[in-house]
Image (cartoon, rainbow, N blue to C red):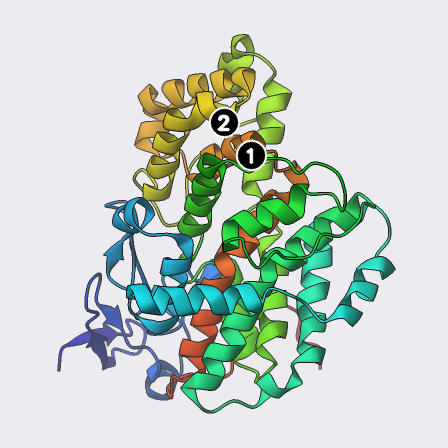
Amino acid sequence: MATVTLTNNITGKSYELELLAPSKGSALIDVRTLYAKTGLFTYDPGFTSTASCSSNITYIDGEAGELRYRGYSIEYLAKNHSYIEVCHLLLTGALPSPSQFKEFDAELRKRAFIPQSMVKLFHAFPDGSHPMSNMASAVAALASFHYEHLEMQESQDFQIMARRLIAKMPTLAAFSYRHSLNIPLIYPDLDRSFTENFLYMMRAYPTGPREEIRPIEIAALDTIFTLHADHEQNASTSTVRAVGSTGAHPYVAISAGISALWGPAHGGANEAVIAQLIDIGSIDNVDAYIARAKDPKDDFKLMGFGHRVYKNFDPRAKLLKNLLDELKEELGVDNNLLKIAQKIESVALSDPYFIERKLYPNIDFYSGLILIALKIPRPMFTVIFTIGRTVGWITQWIEQKMDTEQKIARPRQRYTGPIID
């Protein structure tokens, strides 16, 4: 057994702590016995150096710019498999055979419909309410319709619960959007695939000619869903696990994850990128904004650059950059915003300030431009993220549920308040 020695320089005592070896990545110091042995806790704001669980779902090497789902590189999956195939991989640990895919796809199509009485919930939301608040509320409410998922023991039960939620997310998202505009709701079409169905429910009207949904649009959005499917122990996934650790209903845990994702420092960042590009307005203004980003006295932050984990080019950003280059003409990407983004990218990638700080473009820098080209309004950007990430959240929830080492999430604190006798 490999160990490390911890020495208290005040008392002179030394303690042995076990080293845990992962299948890939850095070794970990097992601090579960730290307090019992030493009477000390670790202090780690933001958990930057703390692993909260063992997981075999997603692997990230931030220094190398590497992302893998169940061992497969994100580059391979994005180029060779659909989002639905990736969902099957995350949920079951294996890519589907042709027959498994057909069965899985058919199941998701049939489960896409929501309970009819839930429509009343959307009508209860105020006009113009943000789709993300509607989504969080609707997913939490879905727990009332499937309360039986509170008590599950068998793997089959977990799969039914997960597939039910994944299938319904595009419907809930489209309903949230259409209600925010006070326009009629469109129900799922069993003849359409997962991603196509979402675009259909977003765009269609009850009567009249139907707008064509081009294969290129479906492929682009499907890729975005795949790139968002999971991302290890980020803020929203950690929230799902924290709520799940209490024994709460899985859909309530996912609702909490949606709320965490809404933050502009997390899933809301791509919306902030587009807002900033619009604010910059012209390529002639880029240098001034770059200068502001470098000025330590200015609290301005250049959105879409840098990442908590990646200290190299975010592999998802590389894929979206290539996709954007391939599709910008066919999708009709906003030319002015694209030119501004390209100049920012060019300046930042050659500027020592950004290079030394390893501030590379991240996924949010490119995804918003593609979503605009897909006619997805900005308030729906984070909802798109939510649809794609649901499979990761629920897979993480299942893994935690089956992990015998997991306990209720309960960090310690460093108390800095007064003591009054």
* Vertical position of residue 261 compared to residue 327: above or below: below
Q: Residue at x 72, y 56 (%)?
A: 133
* Vertical position of residue 95 compared to residue 356: above or below: below
Residue 331: give its label.
2
Specify the quadrant that holds the C terminus: bottom right
Q: Is residue 125 left or right of residue 31?
A: right
Q: Amino acid at mark 2?
A: Leu
Q: Is residue 34 left or right of residue 202?
A: left
* Vertical position of residue 150 compared to residue 189: above or below: below
Residue 62 seen in the figure: no
Q: Is residue 301 left or right of residue 380?
A: left
Specify the quadrant that holds the N terminus: bottom left
Q: Secondary structure at mark 1?
A: loop
Closest to the observer, 129 or 299:
129
Q: Residue at x 32, y 20 (%)?
A: 350
Most extreme residue toward the left is 1
Instruction: Kindly identify which residue carries mark 1.
Output: 374
Q: x, y percentage for residue 208?
A: 75, 38
Q: x, y percentage for residue 228?
A: 45, 51
Q: Residues within 10 Å of mark 2 (few under 14, many from 20)?
A: some
* Vertical position of residue 187 compared to residue 256: above or below: above
Q: Residue at x 40, y 33 (%)?
A: 361
Q: How many marks?
A: 2
Q: x, y percentage for residue 330?
A: 46, 24
Do the residues under discs 2 and 1 have CB atoms within 8 angstroms?
A: yes
Q: Secondary structure at mark 2?
A: helix
Residue 283 seen in the figure: yes
